[in-house]
Image (spheres, rainbow, N blue to C red):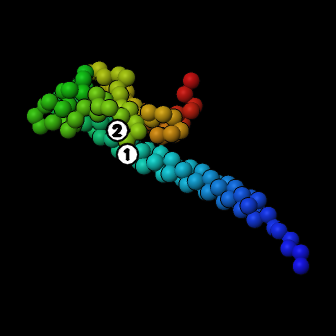
């Protein structure tokens, strides 16, 4: 009898390559989902933190005859404190940087922007005197 030899090594290599390709595809979708989930989590923390800063600024103004503080330090060092910490002087908090572009006795403009657009967040939040909130995509910035 004549034995026909099959090429099992070649078949095994092809099977292995298909499995690797499928694993890479599944991993890609899993990573995308993790990034999306992380962005949603970061954004859900950024907005309340910015509103907390705004509420502290508004409370200070209400208690000081309509004059807003000229620095966040006034909010953290007053007794009782309006804010537990200076979020604008902290390293990024859950993927967002916080800052106040304008902090004057007449009003304020504070913002929360993602550390890396479309990686740590997709939205930039800006809140101004009176608690007026504006949201825009971070990739829409000039």
Expressed as whole percent of the image width and height from the top left, the position of residue 58 reads: 27, 34
Is residue 9 shown above or below 69?
A: below
Q: Nearer the viewer, residue 33 or 77?
A: 33
At 65% from the left and 55% from the top, the residue drawn is 20
Badge 1 marks a residue whose secondary structure is: helix
Secondary element at tag 2: loop
Where is residue 27 drawn, in percent x and y? 58, 54
Let me know if residue 116 appears in the view. yes
Contact, mark 2 vs mark 1 (Cβ under 8 Å): yes
Kindly give the residue lying farthest to the front in the view shown: 1
Q: Nearer the viewer, residue 140 or 90?
A: 90
Q: Quadrant of residue 12?
A: bottom right
The image quadrant where one finds the C terminus is: top right
Q: Quadrant of the N terminus?
A: bottom right
At 13% from the left edge and 31% from the top edge, which residue is drawn?
A: 78
4 left or right of 108 in image: right
Against 123, is 107 above or below? above
69 on left or right of 127 = left
| Alpha carbon separation for disc pair 2 and 1 | 9 Å
Residue 4 horizontal/vertical position (percent): 86, 71
Q: In percent of the image, x 44 and y 33: which residue is there?
A: 115
The residue furthest right is 2
* Label 2 sits on residue: 93
Circle number at residue 45: 1
- Image coordinates of residue 67 in percent, x first then y, are 23, 25
Quadrant of res 14:
bottom right
Closer to the camera: disc 2 or disc 1? 2
């Amino acid at each position: 009898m004549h034995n026909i030899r099959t090429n099992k090594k070649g078949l095994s290599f092809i099977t292995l390559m298909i499995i690797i390709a499928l694993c890479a595809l599944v991993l890609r979708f899993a990573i995308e989902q993790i990034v999306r989930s992380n962005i949603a989590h970061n954004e859900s923390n950024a907005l309340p933190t910015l509103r907390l800063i705004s509420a502290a600024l508004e409370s200070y103004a209400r208690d000081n005859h309509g004059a807003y503080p000229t620095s966040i330090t006034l909010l953290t060092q007053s007794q009782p404190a309006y804010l537990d910490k200076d979020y604008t002087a902290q390293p990024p908090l859950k993927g967002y940087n916080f800052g106040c572009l304008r902090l004057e006795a007449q009003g304020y403009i504070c913002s929360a922007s993602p550390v890396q657009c479309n990686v740590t967040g997709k939205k930039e939040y800006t809140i101004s005197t009176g608690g007026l909130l504006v949201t825009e995509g971070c990739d829409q910035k000039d």
